[in-house]
Image: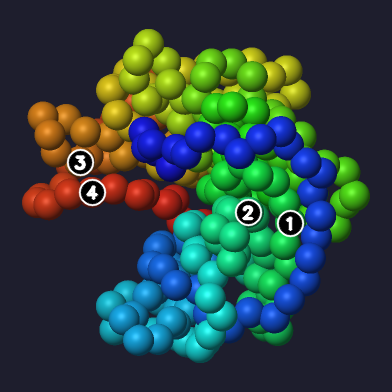
Amino acid sequence: MAAPEKATPGGSGQASAEQTTNVSSLPTATKIGNSKTGRTRYVRLFPDRIFFLVEMLDDRELAAWLRLTVAYVMADGALPSDDKKLALTLSGSNGNLDIYLLDLASQQLTRITEDPGIDTEASFAPDGSIYFTSDRSGSPQVYRVMPGSTERARRVTFTGSYNARPRVSPDGKQLGLLTLAEGSYRIAVQDLASGTLNVLSKGRQEESPSFAPNGAMLIFAGRERGQGVLQTVSTDGLTTARLDADAGEVREPVWGPFLP
């Protein structure tokens, strides 16, 4: 949901209502992040069958596949630190997008949000809560919900008309996100205690913030002269760097964990 178009909100927010079912298919393809071993997690779509790729270290190593066979649409996904569940956005039979949890061992699917608005871009915080983007208030904003809790999702961002793509820092104190500032989509961090939002980058169309394991830097994607580039910025905005690629487009960076 970076610099992207979003549908008109469906109405006022409703309390989260967890519903559990069994899942066996997720029709889409996306990179969803890294496990603690440094491997990359993917969900992939094939024309006739849907597969979930559990781990891939490189192009030659496919650690495990799980066959999935129900009619949902997955928009994005995120893994918690224990690698046991996948948070993702699914569209049910009514076409509405909500946040679900998929247990990777049992394939049990639990619905976390239930709202007429679009709920997407789920991301785990260190305490197990989920931050996600929703337009239930009339514009894309970041919300927080705790799986298993009876409390409704709580809005987190209030600065500006567009805040999306939430990523929580490893210490749980800061929220990295994409914000609309001065007519451009830029990378920002919000202090979760005070609510203060600081814009860190200066480009026009940036996306996909990801915290370094030590929480001191973010990597993100941007565009220069029509070309996709990767950049880093410190959480205080004082240090920036560009990571050049030899050729082709570079997008959707995800900072891997510390390796033993």
Q: How many marks?
A: 4
Q: Earlier in the sequence, mark 4 or mark 1?
A: 1
State the image quarter where residue 36 is shown: bottom right
Amino acid type at mark 1: Ile
Per the rendering, the mark at residue 250 is 4
Q: Measure the alpha-carbon separation of dots 4 and 1.
A: 32 Å
Q: Are marks 1 and 2 in contact (CB under 8 Å)?
A: yes
- Judged left or right of residue 81, residue 54 is left
Q: Measure the alpha-carbon separation of dots 3 and 4.
A: 5 Å
Per the rendering, the mark at residue 112 is 1
Horizontal and vertical percent for residue 260?
54, 66
Give the residue number, with chain letter if any, for mark 3: 228
- The local crowd at label 3, few if under 14, some if 14 to 19, many if 20 or more residues have their Cα within 10 Å, is some
Horizontal and vertical percent for residue 169?
60, 39
- Judged left or right of residue 127, residue 217 is left
Q: Name the residue at 16% across, 30% down.
A: 224
Query: Which residue is more in the foreground, 209 or 243?
Result: 209
**SS at mark 3?**
strand
Q: Is residue 72 above or below residue 96?
A: below
Q: Please tell me whether mark 4 or mark 1 is closer to you in this view.
A: 1
Q: Are marks 4 and 2 in contact (CB under 8 Å)?
A: no
- The local crowd at label 1, few if under 14, some if 14 to 19, many if 20 or more residues have their Cα within 10 Å, is many
Q: Please tell me whether mark 4 or mark 2 is closer to you in this view.
A: 2
Q: Measure the alpha-carbon separation of dots 1 and 3.
A: 34 Å
Amino acid type at mark 3: Gly
Horizontal and vertical percent for residue 158?
64, 19
Q: Earlier in the sequence, mark 4 or mark 2?
A: 2
Per the rendering, the mark at residue 98 is 2
**SS at mark 2?**
strand
**SS at mark 1?**
loop
